[in-house]
Image (spheres, rainbow, N blue to C red):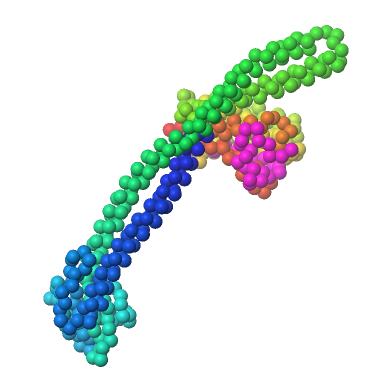
Amino acid sequence: MIRRLRRKLVVITMTLSTALLVVICAVFVLSIREGLQRDSMSVLQRVIAETETPQWAGRSGVSLPYFTVTVTPNGGTSIISSQFYDLDDYDRLISAVDAALSQGRNAGELRQEELRYLRQATSEGWRMAFVDVSYERSTLKKAVVTVVLVGALALGVLFALSVTLARWAVRPVEQSVEQQRQFIADASHELKTPLTVILSNADLIARQEGLPDHIRRWTENIRTGGGQMQSLVEQMLTLERSESRQEGGESRTGEMIDLSDLTENALLLFEPVAYEAGKTLEEETISPGLTVQGDGASLSRALDILLDNAVKYTPAGGGIRVTLEEAGKNACFRVSNQGEPIPEEERERIFRRFYRSDAARSSEGFGLGLAIARSIAEEHGGTLNVTSHQGWNTFTLVIPLAN
């Protein structure tokens, strides 16, 4: 939980920072482009009215190459002024004039020729001015490269800061959660001894001969309540140990487990349970030889929880389907049962500890089973989710296959 909270804080911080940085960089690049375009348009507006070659320099101190021409109604073209522009290639010049005229606009850009133009109607036809924008493009390109490099460096610094800040921000939460876990662990250990004494004494009383019926009934109530409390304590301890290992970055990768065999064994145990409850347990596909790394007892417990959950919440006469298949680099275990569909807003909540979605799902257990199963899945690098479709609720356990 703490690691997820840290990641969420880092993601939120980086998303906002990246969006802000992109906007700032975009505004900076656009302002540079706007300034360069203003410079070239200033040249065009000035030289188109000149009859002699003017001396003009942009803000940057670099004179922009340009030339001006006149175009008569019959298509004759003549150069009237130029500066720093190579006019040796007359065919290229005429091609640029024709391309500008074909656009039918008084101002525009010829991207292929790297020219920007401005035209003005005169009594003799058209007067046109062209300015070279290759310097403008190279300057803009350098600006973009610089902005990208600076932005990448800034994002790296921001990421390091966000990680540090996230650790600092969640430290009080981490301490609180750790204290809560320690309390649960200590309380559970302290409860185990008196519960054992209570159950042992209840068993001794129940073995006595000649007990009145009401005493025997009270004794059985003690044994039932004590057994439930003992089961709750064990489940809480299991969940806390699993989550503590996850927060500490530990994983159970000590042994190779044949998940196919575990699934077959679990089905053998639950087939008579389902039959006694008047429900059908159907084995659809169990792919053989699917091996994972982890703890066999924990994985077996996760399978038992899912099958037990399916049996509990399938109505009488309903069906349960089980599949185990290879899905890419993962083993995919699915348990589908008929029953009331789980609302979409409840599909994450049912994995919370002690959560009960409705009265129908709170008749048995403590609400810890699915939380334990998901914790076991995450401890093994996998996932556990639920979907509902056409009267079937499907729990899908995904565990990475062993390399």
State the image coordinates of residue 223 (x, y, percent, origin top left): 75, 18
Count every numbered label the image shows and give the total: 0
State the image coordinates of residue 233 (x, y, percent, origin top left): 64, 22
Residue 207, above or below 65: above
Q: As drawn, is 248 to the left or to the right of 386?
A: left
Q: As drawn, is 250 to the left or to the right of 394?
A: left
Give the residue drawn at x 32%, y 60%.
29
Residue 94 magenta-highlighted:
no
Residue 66 sits in quarter: bottom left
Give the residue drawn at x 67%, y 49%.
390
State the image coordinates of residue 283 (x, y, percent, origin top left): 63, 36
Viewport quadrant of the C terminus: top left
Looking at this view, name the residue that lies furthest to the left: 88
State the image coordinates of residue 87 (x, y, percent, origin top left): 14, 76
Q: As drawn, is 340 to the left or to the right of 151?
A: right
Residue 241, above or below 47: above
Residue 74 visible in the picture: no
Residue 3, above or below 180: below
Nearer to us in this view, 266 or 96:
96
Residue 356 magenta-highlighted:
yes
Residue 151 visible in the picture: yes
Looking at this view, name the residue that lies furthest to the top: 209
Q: Which residues are magenta?
A: 330-359
Give the residue drawn at x 71%, y 37%.
361
Give the residue drawn at x 41%, y 36%.
164
Residue 71 sits in quarter: bottom left
